[in-house]
């Protein structure tokens, strides 16, 4: 009789489901908008359903002030960052009680508020900072965002090509991702930015690649940035190739892109990843790319 309690415990351990752990992998729909930006569903607070842009170049989550007020966000100071064109942005910070993206749930999340989102009737932007501990995959052909388990991540690694992923982690508040690229044979460390469409290359590469700004093959476009009012000039043309340096088969041939005075070597937008399955394994500092 003394063994009955231990036998009962063993039976219950084998019989009852492990309710505390979400089933992984879990996928949520990934929508590609006409401007090539990616959007996903998310939940703010206890039950506020929102549609947000998934932007690996945003650095920090950004939400419309009206939504922050709705879920009772608490002021938490200010963060100063810089856009790729060098403009300084001072953003007010807030603590939201809860943010859920698929099975990833964060409590007391620090986010930035941006009035322009309310004016544009947009809910917000989710960055990769919240996913730093959870490997995830952008399946662009399948239109799915998948959260990987240890087993599925191993299968992704076996089926794809892994390259090193570099990170710019600013005080745990802001996180950007970079990888080494080959820009028509010239090396460059490029930000991976799913919030942009085409690639933008630092204008110093024009001389390195023998591109004349005044050539008929180069189209000059000047505008003012909506966010800051700064004057921005881009030079649009094509180059022979843009590729991952450590996986040259992952490339675009003759991509149309722009050159501009930016603070990075280049910023690679969503066009580069079209038709591919891309896994971001931030804990292991690697990017895994595969065909569909």
Image (spheres, helix red, strand yellow):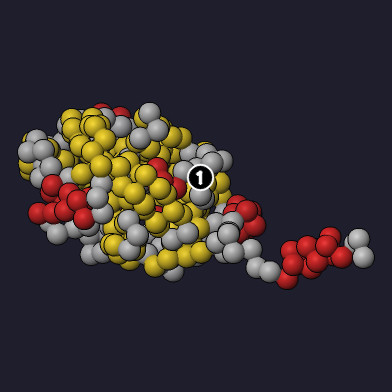
25 lies above or below 285: below
Q: Residue farthest to the bottom?
A: 15
Task: Give x and y (percent) for residue 34.
Answer: 23, 64
Determine which quarter of the picture holds residue 113: top left
Quadrant, the N terminus = bottom right
Task: Give x and y (percent) for residue 205.
Answer: 28, 32
Q: Nearer the viewer, residue 250 or 217?
A: 250
Kindly tell me whether residue 216 is visible in this rendering.
Answer: no
Report the label total. 1
- Answer left or right for 59 relative to 249: left
- Answer left or right for 236 relative to 24: left
The residue carrying pointer 1 sits among few (fewer than 14), some (14 to 19) or many (20 or more) residues within 10 Å by Cα, namely few
Q: Which residue is mark 1?
A: 133
275 lies above or below 60: below
Task: Give x and y (percent) for residue 148.
Answer: 55, 57
Residue name at image x 16 percent, y 36 percent: 213
Residue name at image x 84 percent, y 60 percent: 6
Residue name at image x 37 percent, y 44 percent: 108
Q: Residue farthest to the right?
A: 1
Task: Give x and y (percent) for residue 20.
Answer: 58, 59
Kindly tell me whether residue 45 is visible in this rendering.
Answer: yes
188 lies above or below 289: above
Residue name at image x 19 percent, y 51 percent: 69
Q: Nearer the viewer, residue 253 or 93?
A: 93
> Which element carries disc 1, helix, strand or loop?
loop
Determine which quarter of the picture holds residue 17: bottom right
Q: Nearer the viewer, residue 82 or 163?
A: 82
Q: Nearer the viewer, residue 21 or 140?
A: 21
């Amino acid at each position: 009789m003394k063994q009955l309690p231990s036998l009962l415990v063993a039976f219950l351990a084998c019989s009852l489901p492990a309710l505390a752990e979400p089933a992984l992998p879990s996928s949520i729909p990934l929508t590609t908008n006409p401007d090539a930006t990616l959007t996903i569903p998310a939940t703010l607070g206890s039950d506020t359903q929102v549609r947000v842009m998934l932007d690996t170049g945003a650095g920090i989550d950004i939400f419309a002030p009206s939504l922050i007020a709705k879920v009772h966000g608490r002021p938490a100071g200010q963060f100063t960052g810089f856009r790729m064109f060098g403009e300084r942005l001072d953003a007010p910070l807030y603590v939201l009680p809860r943010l859920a993206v698929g099975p990833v749930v964060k409590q007391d999340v620090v986010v930035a508020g941006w009035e322009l989102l309310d004016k544009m009737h947009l809910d917000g932007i989710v960055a990769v900072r919240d996913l730093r501990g959870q490997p995830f995959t952008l399946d662009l052909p399948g239109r799915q965002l998948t959260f990987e388990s240890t087993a599925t991540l191993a299968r992704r690694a076996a089926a794809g090509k892994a390259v090193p992923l570099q990170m710019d982690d600013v005080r745990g508040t802001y996180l950007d991702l970079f990888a080494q690229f080959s820009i028509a044979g010239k090396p460059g460390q490029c930000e991976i930015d799913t919030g942009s469409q085409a690639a933008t290359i630092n204008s110093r590469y024009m001389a390195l690649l023998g591109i004349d700004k005044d050539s008929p093959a180069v189209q000059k476009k000047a505008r003012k940035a909506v966010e800051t009012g700064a004057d921005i000039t881009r030079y649009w043309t094509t180059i022979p190739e843009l590729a991952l340096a450590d996986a040259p088969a992952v490339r675009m041939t003759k991509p149309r892109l722009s050159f501009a005075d930016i603070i990075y070597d280049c910023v690679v937008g969503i066009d580069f990843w079209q038709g591919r399955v891309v896994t971001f394994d931030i804990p292991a500092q690697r990017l895994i790319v595969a065909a569909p």
